[in-house]
């Protein structure tokens, strides 16, 4: 007898690139059968007229055990997230992994080690200065410890830590390469300056052998220079380098107001004024900023998140012309439990991707769209049991209607960022029915997973 038996679904397998109607039996958190026969089960789910795919995998998020953010993730069809991006991860990551691995969470989560966090733990608190040799050695030791404890890889947020030196970057990336773990890179700049910054990320791969994931490409280049950026990335891939990338579905990004991203020089660079910034949370939540409120936030509330309402949306589909471009959310703007403020990416990225890139434009087939959200990030992260439909694979499944799938979240000055999407019928995580018709049935079915691996010996 199966724990869950899903019948009459149109099953999308991104590995074989086939769609077929069949039933799926789930037992012990794994896919136990794919059949056209009937079977007995504890719980049955009729999916006539619906499509079943592997659960969506978000390769770039910042939700670190935030229950509200985790629920928004699974309500948009995501079953696994990769946190710790942009150089930001919990302090003492081994302790975090030990603590969280025994608790349930809304989705499965993996953690990258953030280089910004390593710098702080090593005593370098000046974001404009490089680490010393001794600080780099300390950071290297902390990285070894975190990767051995189950961290999924390394991340850099070079735009947040402009003092980061080539020596420290390469020293840390070599350790990730030896552990066979990817390196996610938020490059040093966006806009036109970002075009040269791409080469620094590519050089990490070329000089260390680490697989490099270039983060949220549209947020860096969705201002009129997208094709130039894609050409640089693809040239490196054609050279044979292990480079891949991800992108969200918005050009208007969010980050903390106190970071170098929002230094006053940003207005001249982007050719906008103060009112192009919208407070995502905090004192001025939902308001466009003035010079006075901008200075107040920068001085007194540097951890408040602000959205830069910039970019040209027609650049977004261009990003997905690269066959290895994955979809990602960058979710986790609002670290609190009030989801009514924040960024619509936290609730709408994946439905928006399917609505715009598959249904409305036909730019990608349904199978290829599913690949960008499942098997591509699974393979990049080494998750061999996820992102696929097959016997023995993890029973992380998303059941949706591709004709109805639609994002509803809006920017905080326009409406509710956390408005739930349409078209996500059911979500299964580790064999448990977690979401059904927008209702949350089991908010703790996910796991915080520690990755195990043996470092290479050269």
Image: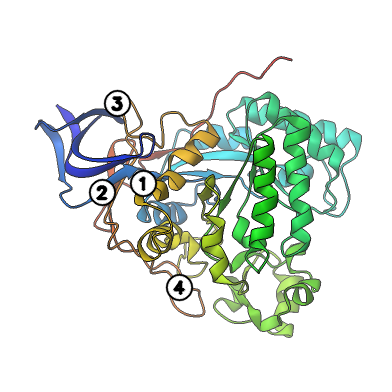
Residue tagged by mark 4? 410
* SS class, disc 3: loop
The C terminus lies in which quarter of the figure? top right
* SS class, disc 4: loop
Residue tagged by mark 2? 51
Which badge, 1 or 2, comes first in the chain's sequence?
A: 2
Q: CA distance from mark 3 to mark 1?
A: 19 Å
Q: Are marks 1 and 2 in contact (CB under 8 Å)?
A: no
Residue tagged by mark 3? 391
Residue tagged by mark 1? 367
Residue depth check, mark 3 versus mark 4: number of the one nearer the observer: 3
Q: Nearer the viewer, residue 26 or 358?
A: 358
Compared to residue 84, the image places residue 351 above or below, namely: below
* SS class, disc 1: helix
Q: Are marks 3 and 2 in contact (CB under 8 Å)?
A: no
Q: CA distance from mark 4 to mark 1?
A: 28 Å
Label 3 crowd (10 A; few <14 / some 14-19 / many >=20)? some
Label 1 crowd (10 A; few <14 / some 14-19 / many >=20)? some
In the drawing, does residue 168 fall left or right of residue 367?
A: right
* SS class, disc 2: strand
Which badge, 3 or 4, comes first in the chain's sequence?
A: 3
Q: Where is residue 434 shown, x and y percent of the image?
A: 30, 47
In the drawing, does residue 7 fall left or right of residue 57?
A: left
């Amino acid at each position: 007898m199966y724990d869950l038996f899903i019948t009459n679904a149109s099953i999308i397998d991104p590995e074989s690139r086939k769609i077929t109607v069949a039933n799926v039996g789930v037992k012990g958190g794994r896919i136990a059968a794919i059949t056209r026969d009937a079977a007995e089960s504890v719980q049955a789910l009729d999916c006539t007229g619906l499509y079943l795919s592997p659960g969506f995998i978000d390769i770039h998020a910042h939700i670190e055990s935030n229950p509200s953010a985790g629920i928004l993730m699974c309500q948009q069809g995501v079953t696994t997230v990769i946190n710790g991006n942009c150089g930001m991860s919990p302090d003492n990551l081994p302790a975090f992994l030990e603590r969280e691995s025994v608790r349930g969470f809304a989705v499965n989560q993996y953690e990258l080690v953030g280089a910004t966090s390593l710098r702080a733990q090593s005593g370098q608190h000046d974001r404009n200065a490089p680490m010393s040799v001794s600080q780099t050695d300390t950071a290297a030791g902390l990285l070894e410890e975190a990767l051995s404890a189950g961290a999924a890889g390394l991340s850099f947020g070079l735009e947040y830590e402009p003092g980061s030196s080539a020596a420290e970057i390469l020293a840390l990336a070599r350790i990730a390469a030896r552990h066979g773990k990817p390196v996610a890179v938020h490059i040093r700049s966006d806009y036109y300056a970002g075009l040269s910054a791409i080469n620094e990320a590519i050089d990490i791969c070329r000089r260390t052998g680490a697989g490099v994931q270039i983060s949220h490409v549209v947020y860096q280049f969705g201002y009129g220079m997208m094709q130039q950026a894609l050409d640089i990335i693809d040239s490196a891939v054609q050279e044979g380098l292990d480079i891949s990338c991800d992108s969200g579905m918005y050009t208007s990004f969010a980050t903390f107001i106190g970071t170098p991203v929002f230094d006053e020089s940003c207005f001249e660079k982007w050719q906008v004024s103060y009112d192009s910034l919208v407070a995502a949370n905090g004192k001025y939540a939902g308001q466009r900023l003035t010079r006075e409120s901008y200075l107040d936030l920068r001085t007194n509330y540097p951890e408040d998140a602000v959205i830069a309402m910039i970019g040209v949306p027609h650049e977004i589909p261009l990003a997905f012309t690269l066959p290895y471009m994955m979809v990602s959310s960058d979710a986790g703007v609002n670290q609190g439990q009030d989801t009514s403020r924040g960024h619509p990416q936290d609730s709408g990225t994946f439905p928006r991707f399917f609505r715009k890139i598959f249904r409305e434009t036909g730019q990608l087939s349904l199978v290829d769209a599913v690949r960008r959200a499942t098997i591509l990030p699974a393979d990049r992260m080494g998750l061999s049991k996820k992102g696929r439909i097959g016997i023995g694979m993890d029973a992380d499944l998303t059941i949706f209607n591709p004709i109805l799938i639609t994002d509803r979240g809006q920017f905080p000055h326009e409406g509710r960022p956390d408005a739930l999407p349409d078209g996500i019928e059911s979500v299964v995580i580790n064999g448990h029915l977690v979401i059904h018709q927008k209702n949350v049935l089991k908010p703790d079915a996910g796991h915080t997973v520690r990755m195990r691996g043996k470092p290479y010996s050269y």
